[in-house]
Image (cartoon, rainbow, N blue to C red):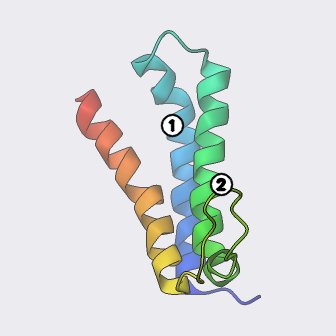
Amino acid sequence: MHLTLGRIISVPIAVVLLISGSSTVPALWTHRSAAEMAFRNCVFVIFALALIWFPEQIGAAAGYVVRGGLPEKTPGMLVFIAGWFFLIVPPVLMYLVSR
């Protein structure tokens, strides 16, 4: 496994999202505990990082879905782009909604 520019850039962004998300998200939804929201934030960021760091391996997981299945492999670049989408767009939307 070699470090690419996408991997290097994604880690500091993820750290910033984990730190800022753990402190600001619970204030938006008071019916959930801060620990629950921090856990959900961690799972979401780890999911996005997995898509960015391992796009070829995740894209190659064809046919492993229980219902319906995935008949063909997903291109690694599409998985990589989806990872960046999940890492960047939701925090931007959360910022815009909370303003």
Q: Which residue is disc 2 drawn over?
A: 46
Q: Nearer the viewer, residue 80 or 15?
A: 80
Q: Where is residue 73 shown, x and y percent of the image?
A: 60, 83
**Distance from Cα at disc 2 to Cα at disc 1:** 13 Å
- In-image side of 14 versus 62 (left or right): left
What type is the residue that disc 2 sits on?
Answer: Ile
Q: Where is residue 48 shown, x and y percent of the image?
A: 56, 60
Q: Where is residue 1 shown, x and y percent of the image?
A: 77, 88
Where disc 1 sits, the SS reads helix
Residue at x 65% of width, y 65% of height: 50
Q: Which residue is disc 1 drawn over?
A: 21
Q: Residues within 10 Å of mark 1 (few under 14, many from 20)?
A: some
Q: Nearer the viewer, residue 31 or 38?
A: 31
Q: Residues within 10 Å of mark 2 (few under 14, many from 20)?
A: some
Give the label, 2 or 1, closer to the camera. 2
Residue at x 64% of width, y 84% of height: 56
